[in-house]
Amino acid sequence: MQTVLVTGGTGFVGRNLVPRLRQAGFEVRIFTRYRDKGQALQSQYGCAFFEGSPYDLSRLAKACEGASAVIHLVGAVTETPQAPFEDVHTRLTRLVVEAACQKGVRRFLHVSALGARPYSLCRYYRSKWQAEQCVQASPLDWTILRPSVIFGKGDRFTTRIAQLVESFSASLLLKTLPLPGGGVSFLQPVAVWDVAEVCLRALGHPDAIGRTLVVAGPQRLSLRAIVEEIFAAVGVPSQTPRSSPLAATLRRWSEALGGVVLAVAGSGLLGVSPSLAFPSILLGLSFLLHATCDPTWLLPPVPWPVSYAAAWLAERCVGPRLLSVSELCVLEEGSWGDPTPTAELLGIHWTPFSEGIRRYLPL
């Protein structure tokens, strides 16, 4: 029975790939720094796990002993001062390749990113490109997979938006979700179970060796279309104000603010003129309730500079929220390609986005 080492096996893609590998009859080893997550996968799927720092070459080499293949999944779309992209992607990939070569591993699958290129304005894409160069320069039987935005239960994109929408829709908060750049960036979301299937099939396919494969869904969608599909999947109405988005958004917010002002002013008149106080309070509350109880979410466009400034401030004040600066950069450049050659080579049938999200939404 062949043994496959999966780096990043406790991550989003790894948690979907490991059971698929086990079903196909592989012995699976997971390399992770998270003991509790590794133990959970070990008990659930009967796989081994190696705990340690991914930058420890000797520990990586130990994990590679006796393995016939390595699937390298480690990556991050948000960087921190402690974990810059150059370390997480380029340096770590170089170490994993070196460990595999030391222990005589032949087969190597590297999961990169659709959009990786040397002259990108996005550090994420540049570091992914540099990691690919490390793999291609090695003597290994390598395959590079370039997925677009990956979606599925527990992801950082669709699940996060759905949680926000479902929690706020039941509250008296103003239901507004700004779209960076107007939501015109194009993505080609791919289901995580399709990514896992591509990894499995490419692993044993001799014609996949030495190739870089596009892994993307069948639909090229704008960010606005993606968000609208998520809203539809959770059963919450959304609206893009077409004529004057800013005016429509300000109108709702000013209605709420005006309601608060009237209600506060009315309460201040209670001891002076009840005949004026009660109508003012009732009118203010009616304005406020109308603005906050409207179930329809507004999706106003926000210019890229404003989006970047808001994300930058959020990162420094409260940490990354819906989108980090690096995620915005990836979003602005977009992520799409032609997955037909990959589908024909491996016999993959890509899951449409609208169908795929309804497998786990509403949450």
Image (cartoon, rainbow, N blue to C red):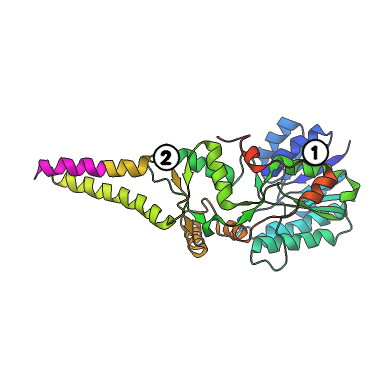
Q: Is residue 34 left or right of residue 280?
A: right
Magenta stretch encompasses residue 154: no
Label 2 sits on a secondary structure element that is: loop
Mark 1 belongs to which amino acid? Val
Q: In this picture, which residue range is highlighted in magenta?
A: 273-285
Residue at the (55%, 51%) spot, across then down:
224
Number of the label disc, if any, that sits on residue 186: none
Whole-percent x, y for residue 278 in the image: 16, 40
Is any part of residue 63 visible from this angle? no
Q: Residue furthest bottom?
A: 119
Which secondary structure is most common in the magenta stretch? helix
How crowded is the residue under tag 2: few (<14 C-alpha within 10 Å), some, or many (20+)?
A: some
Whole-percent x, y for residue 362 in the image: 55, 35
Is any part of residue 321 visible from this angle? yes
* Label 1, label 2: how far apart the Cα atoms are: 47 Å
Residue 160 figure quarter: top right
Q: Is residue 275 left or right of residue 207?
A: left
Label 1 sits on a secondary structure element that is: strand
Q: Looking at the rendering, in which quadrant would you find the C terminus?
A: top right
How crowded is the residue under tag 1: few (<14 C-alpha within 10 Å), some, or many (20+)?
A: many
Q: Disc 2 designates what residue?
A: 295
Magenta stretch encompasses residue 279: yes
Residue at the (23%, 43%) spot, across then down:
283
